[in-house]
């Protein structure tokens, strides 16, 4: 199976399955001498882990990270950083009913047709549990670049959207509620919506907005390795993501050039930021901001038609522990993937200088 690595110089390779003994990763290219804050790394894991509130899956996993290599006396050594996260609360029997059935809108069918075999217990490598490894690497990447601030938050759940521009938000309030929306009033409405959806045995989608501040000018390349293209690839690699837009995004398509152009100030900054901090594929020093769309979780606790291995349409009902809305737990994953992209580009720029 290919496609288990991300990055060029700061490179993460992950391994393991949702219901295996453990998941883990190897980070290659991390510079030596970085003092790691292990508490901060674990805090990022706690933001992603299941069972943290009543509006997420109730699978209970401590998601404790065990570092195997690349760290000595609290500092990185410059050698590959190996780590594992043990799975401790698998309930594989919850998936026995789909051993020979392909769930709608899951990777079951395509996975088996491609590889000729699949681990039906939680989806194997296609499970979102793999993203825990990304959060570990992203937490280390953040510590490589402490001046750059990466802050993501829930900006919509279903049709409940946070209408305020990010400049008016207090990001310190993002972690003050279980849905991770920095506007308390909107957060309460989102939480109520998710609870109602859960009672129906259904799921709902939403969006995550991410703001990256203090990015130096000059990250990214003007042709295939555009900064926003790599950010898009990073976000679209996250489970359940259906869309990515940066800067003005699709709204920019409705504007005239004279409305959309970001006019300069005499210091090189711009009066507006429709470009989203990136012009010609290269960071321009303004805030980078983008939005990521997540679909409703495909497993619903309602009866639906499915396809079995013999080609018959059969009725099935989802079982097990699943998120009614994946968005609140996706916040640290979005931040982590953004951090991996920026860390890679910072190392590339250093290599070029």
Image (spheres, rainbow, N blue to C red):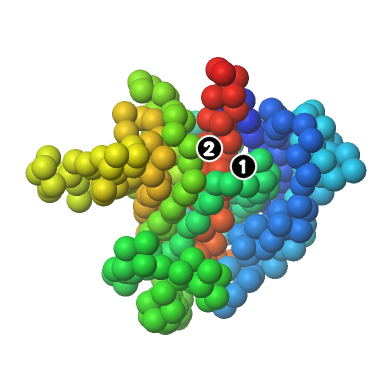
**Place of residue 292 in the rendered image (x, y in percent of width and height, measured from the top left):** 39, 51
Give the position of the N terminus as an image quadrant.
top right
Dot 1 falls on a residue whose secondary structure is loop
Q: Residue at x 38, y 44 (%)?
A: 286
2 to the left or right of 281: right
| Disc 1 target residue | 145
Tell me: residue 173, above or below residue 290: below
Q: Residue at x 12, y 40 (%)?
A: 257
Between 75 and 271, which is closer to the camera in this rendering? 271
**Place of residue 304 in the rendered image (x, y in percent of width and height, measured from the top left):** 39, 63
| Disc 2 target residue | 342
Between 257 and 337, which is closer to the camera in this rendering? 257
**Place of residue 37 in the rendered image (x, y in percent of width and height, measured from the top left):** 76, 52
Determine which quarter of the picture holds residue 144.
top right
CB atoms of marks 1 and 2 within 8 Å: yes
Q: Residue at x 37, y 62 (%)?
A: 167
22 to the left or right of 333: right
């Amino acid at each position: 199976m290919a496609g288990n690595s991300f990055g060029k110089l700061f490179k993460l390779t992950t391994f393991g399955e949702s219901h295996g003994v453990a998941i883990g990763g190897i980070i290659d290219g991390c510079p030596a001498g970085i003092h790691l804050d292990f508490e901060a790394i674990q805090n990022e894991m706690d933001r992603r882990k299941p069972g943290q509130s009543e509006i997420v899956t109730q699978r209970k996993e401590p998601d404790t990270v065990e570092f195997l290599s690349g760290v000595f006396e609290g500092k990185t050594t410059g050698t590959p950083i190996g780590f594992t996260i043990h799975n401790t609360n698998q309930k594989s029997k919850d998936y026995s009913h789909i051993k020979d059935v392909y769930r709608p809108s899951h990777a079951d069918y395509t996975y088996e047709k491609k590889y000729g075999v699949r681990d039906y217990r939680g989806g194997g490598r296609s499970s979102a549990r793999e993203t825990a490894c990304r959060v570990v690497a992203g937490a280390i990447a953040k510590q490589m670049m402490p001046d750059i601030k990466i802050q993501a938050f829930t900006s919509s759940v279903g049709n409940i959207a946070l209408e305020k521009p990010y400049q008016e938000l207090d990001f310190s309030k993002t972690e003050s509620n279980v849905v991770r929306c920095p506007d308390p009033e909107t957060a309460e409405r989102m939480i109520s919506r998710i609870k109602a959806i859960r009672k129906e045995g259904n799921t709902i989608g939403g969006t995550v907005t991410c703001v990256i501040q203090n990015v130096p000018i000059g990250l990214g390349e003007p042709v295939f390795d555009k900064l926003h293209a790599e950010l898009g690839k990073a976000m679209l690699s996250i489970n359940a993501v259906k869309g990515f837009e940066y800067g003005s995004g699709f709204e920019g398509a409705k504007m005239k050039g004279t409305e959309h152009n970001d006019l300069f100030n005499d210091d090189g900054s711009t009066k507006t930021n429709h470009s989203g901090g990136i012009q010609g594929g290269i960071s321009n020093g303004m805030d980078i901001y983008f939005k990521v769309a997540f679909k409703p979780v495909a497993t619903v606790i309602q009866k639906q038609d499915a396809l079995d291995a013999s080609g018959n349409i059969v009725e099935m009902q989802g079982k097990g522990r699943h998120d009614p809305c994946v968005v609140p737990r996706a916040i640290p994953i979005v931040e982590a993937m953004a951090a991996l992209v920026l860390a890679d580009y910072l190392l590339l720029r250093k290599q070029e200088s």
